[in-house]
Image (tube, grey):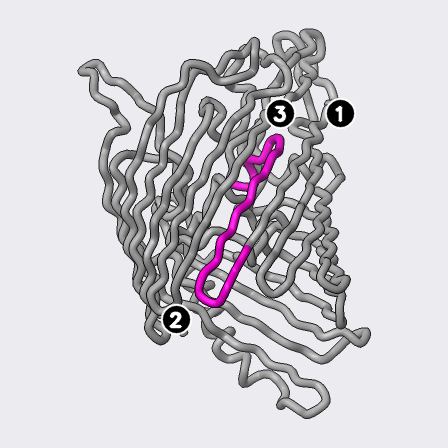
């Protein structure tokens, strides 16, 4: 991995010298930029996390020991530079009367206590006057880049805000102040959970990509939009009969949907942003949700699936330039599963399925001077854990568990 990273960095640095010279008719270039970022993180208890704790979802539930103490009530201090990022953007000669551009971006945020180069974005784009066609991996359409919470933490508002980058083909059309989006999206780094863990194979088996549709309106101060998505997964190819003595082919799939509304009002130094998403089985978007088995055929082992549904929302206010302040509030509610569940925790797949509701309050302050930034953030995360009622498919008798996080970062841009 170290050799691969070294070769990649060398290649990116040499590319500007390998490209042909610019001319007046067709410009072509590549630019390399990014930043070196260092995070110092304090948590008052243990949490559901990824990327070595840089990405936080919500606190772990209470786990009472024989002495009455909570096994998860352990403070931690983490120092990491894994979010350090390299971004390569390029422009090549026009094709089909369209401007051709693209982006390659990576960072070092691998999990399991290790670091290594990770692909974030890799796409090319054809752009006409009012039309764009994108091929490759980038943010899923429900992550609206110009309407996300302004926070210090790299979770960028998740699990109240969608957070996923996956392969896709995206078409956008500008119609005056209106914009139209149509996309087909697959899965890779951010994949649905299932019998074989989080894995893109479930969508591949279904042979149907996720379909996204969006409509937005914007002017000098306002932005409004709505997005919808439909996806289908096939958790198993095979099932096993009574006593695992016989094997059968499975054809059962699960189709779910989501809908999101968002709005932004902005002036010269301040902005007010908000969004809300209602959907089913949204785990692959770094949200709370999932699915489970509702029925099993005792003869063939064939499963019927039922998804959980929920709503996730956030509100963000930002003010300032050199000194910038931000306040973000998030709220989510788990409505439970559509149907009663089969009594087996091993046939449930998702995130936060025993959480009834959760909220987050995040004040942040940024100081920007030239290409140097420092920022400080406090994050209060509370999740209401309860017991999952399999007959009703919902969480009952919940109680709050809270984590307090303090995050300090320095960032050197280049």
Magenta residues (range): 265-286
Image location (x, y in percent) of residue 114? 36, 50
**Front residue of this view, candidates 200 and 379:** 379
Residue hosting label 2: 413
Tell me the CA gap for discs 2 and 1. Answer: 51 Å
At x 35%, y 30%, the residue is: 60
Residue hosting label 3: 307
**Front residue of this view, candidates 96 and 311:** 311
At x 34%, y 35%, the residue is: 47
- Label 3 crowd (10 A; few <14 / some 14-19 / many >=20): many
In the depicted structure, whether residue 207 falls above or below residue 343: below
In the depicted structure, whether residue 71 falls above or below residue 216: above
At x 37%, y 41%, the residue is: 361
Q: Is residue 276 magenta?
A: yes
Residue 251 appears in the figure: yes
Q: Secondary structure at mark 1?
A: loop
Residue at far bottom of view: 24
Q: Earlier in the sequence, mark 2 or mark 1?
A: 1
Please identify, in this view, whether the residue under mark 1 or under mark 3 is nearer the observer: 3
Q: Quadrant of the C terminus?
A: bottom left
Q: Is residue 400 magenta?
A: no
């Amino acid at each position: 991995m170290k050799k691969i990273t070294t070769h990649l960095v060398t290649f990116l640095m040499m590319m500007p010298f390998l490209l042909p010279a610019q001319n007046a008719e067709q410009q072509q270039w590549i630019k390399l930029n990014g930043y070196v970022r260092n995070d110092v993180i304090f948590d008052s208890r243990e949490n559901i996390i990824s990327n070595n704790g840089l990405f936080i979802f919500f606190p772990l539930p209470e786990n009472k020991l024989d002495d009455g103490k909570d096994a998860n009530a352990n403070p931690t201090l983490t120092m990491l530079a894994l979010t350090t990022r390299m971004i390569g953007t390029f422009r090549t000669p026009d094709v089909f009367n369209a401007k051709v551009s693209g982006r390659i971006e990576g960072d070092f945020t691998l999990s399991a206590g290790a670091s290594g180069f990770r692909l974030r974005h890799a796409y090319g784009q054809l752009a006409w006057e009012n039309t764009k066609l994108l091929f490759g991996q980038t943010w899923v359409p429900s992550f609206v880049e110009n309407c996300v919470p302004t926070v210090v933490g790299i979770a960028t508002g998740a699990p109240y805000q969608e957070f996923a980058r996956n392969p896709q083909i995206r078409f956008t059309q500008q119609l005056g102040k209106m914009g139209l989006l149509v996309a087909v999206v697959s899965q890779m780094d951010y994949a649905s959970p299932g019998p074989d863990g989080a894995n893109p194979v479930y969508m591949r088996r279904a042979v149907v990509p996720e379909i996204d549709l969006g409509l937005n309106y914007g002017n000098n101060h306002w932005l409004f939009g709505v997005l919808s998505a439909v996806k289908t997964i096939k958790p198993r190819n095979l099932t096993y009969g009574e006593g695992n003595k016989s094997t059968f082919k499975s054809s059962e799939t699960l189709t779910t949907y989501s809908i999101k509304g968002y709005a932004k009002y902005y002036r010269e130094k301040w902005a007010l942003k908000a969004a809300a998403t209602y959907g089913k089985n949204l785990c692959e978007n770094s949200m709370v949700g999932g699915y489970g088995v509702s029925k099993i055929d005792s003869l063939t082992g064939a499963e019927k699936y039922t998804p959980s549904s929920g709503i996730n929302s956030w509100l963000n206010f930002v003010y300032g330039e050199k000194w910038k302040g931000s306040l973000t509030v998030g709220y989510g509610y788990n409505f439970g599963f559509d149907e009663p569940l089969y009594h087996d925790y091993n046939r449930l797949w998702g995130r936060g399925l025993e959480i009834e509701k959760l909220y987050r309050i995040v004040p942040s302050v940024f100081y920007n001077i030239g290409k140097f930034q420092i920022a400080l953030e406090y994050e209060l995360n509370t999740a209401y854990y309860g017991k999952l009622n399999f007959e009703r498919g919902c969480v009952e008798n919940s109680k709050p568990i809270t984590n307090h996080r303090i995050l300090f970062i320095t960032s050197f841009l280049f």
